[in-house]
Image (tube, grey):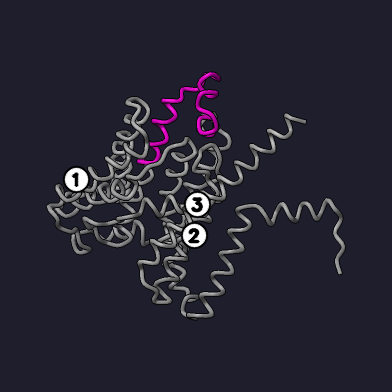
Amino acid sequence: MIQLTPQKRQLLMRTVTRRETSLLIFTLVLIVAVSIHSPRFLSVTNFNDILLNGAILAIASIGQMMVVITGGIDLSVGSGLALSGMLVGLIYKYDYGLNPLLALLLGALIGIALGSVNGVLVSKAGVPPIIASLGTMSIYRGLIFIVSKGQWVNAHEMPDSFIRLARGHILGIPNLIFMTIFFYVAFYYFLTHLKTGREIYAVGGNAEAARVAGISVDRIKYAVYAMSGFLYGLCGVLWVSRFASAQSDSATGFEFSTVTAIVIGGVSVFGGTGKITGVLLGAVLISIVENALAVTQVSPFWKLAIQGFIILLAVTVDAVMKNRDRKTVIRGRQV
């Protein structure tokens, strides 16, 4: 039997109780359990689908993470993603030639414009984030039906070069995986090493203290919504390319998937805390759960129930931990 020193035992317990480690262990257990029930779950084709679907969710969740860290929420992610994708899809539908990379850039610019609306409403007009983004969610979804006239953009109306944007491979690795890795590395550096990234956490931790410290709280709040729009605008183009279709009801409820991914990943809904590595694991877990429900032929309505349960559980755990920390601080002061 291996004897551990108190220091090593403490290090082991700290590693096991970390959110990222717990998520990884739970994900592996889930994969094994589903594979036993349905062996085809472990097929290369199925796992490729899981990673590609999870990639789009992972990228969009970065934006949601930054918004929530500042104490806000963006409920317009799904409709903004769909509107960006539809507008780019219509360009191809009406035979306007567009380089796929320019289509990606156009989607990002559309997303920035949509995200900026939320940013202005929250930072300048003082509208509560949930109300601002709930309103724009409905507006953007309505605009999709207006600009598309209720019609779809189908695969035969898109050039192969555009479809390969999300479906293509580099050295045998899907383009979407490369893009996900790029954005996670870039935003990890941004949030941990750059001044603006650290200010995002400061605003979420205590907005008044951040203002006293000379941080422009309004600028930061505007910036996170604009960056969220940038990311879901990109995802809108990738979504259309991935599924070779732009539909009026695309990404319905997708915003709740991003919220679920980040709360699973350890981002506190109370603001101020969260790691981008946890968000990536949360997005992968959500993608695995969705695929597992399909493979095991469980009713898709369970997806909504599971997401709701996960969100409630994560928020409850955060609240309990915050109350415990607050009581610990109070006891320390009394001593």
Q: Secondary structure at mark 1?
A: helix
Please provide the residue range marked out in magenta.
201-229
Instruction: Please rate how many residues cluster around mark 2, counting C-alpha atoms within 10 Å: few if below 14, some from 14 to 19, many from 20.
Output: many
Vertical arrangement, residue 264 with respect to residue 270, above or below: below
Label located before the other in sequence (3 or 2): 3
Q: Which of label 3 and label 2 is nearer to you?
A: 2
Between discs 1 and 2, the one toward the N terminus = 1
User: Would residue 137 be counted in the magenta stretch?
Assistant: no
Residue pointed to by mark 1: 143
Which residue was labeled with disc 3? 181
Residue 212 magenta: yes
Helix, strand or loop for disc 3: helix
Viewer-side label of 1, 3: 1
Image point (61%, 41%), residue name: 323
Mark 2, residue position: 284
Q: Secondary structure at mark 2?
A: helix
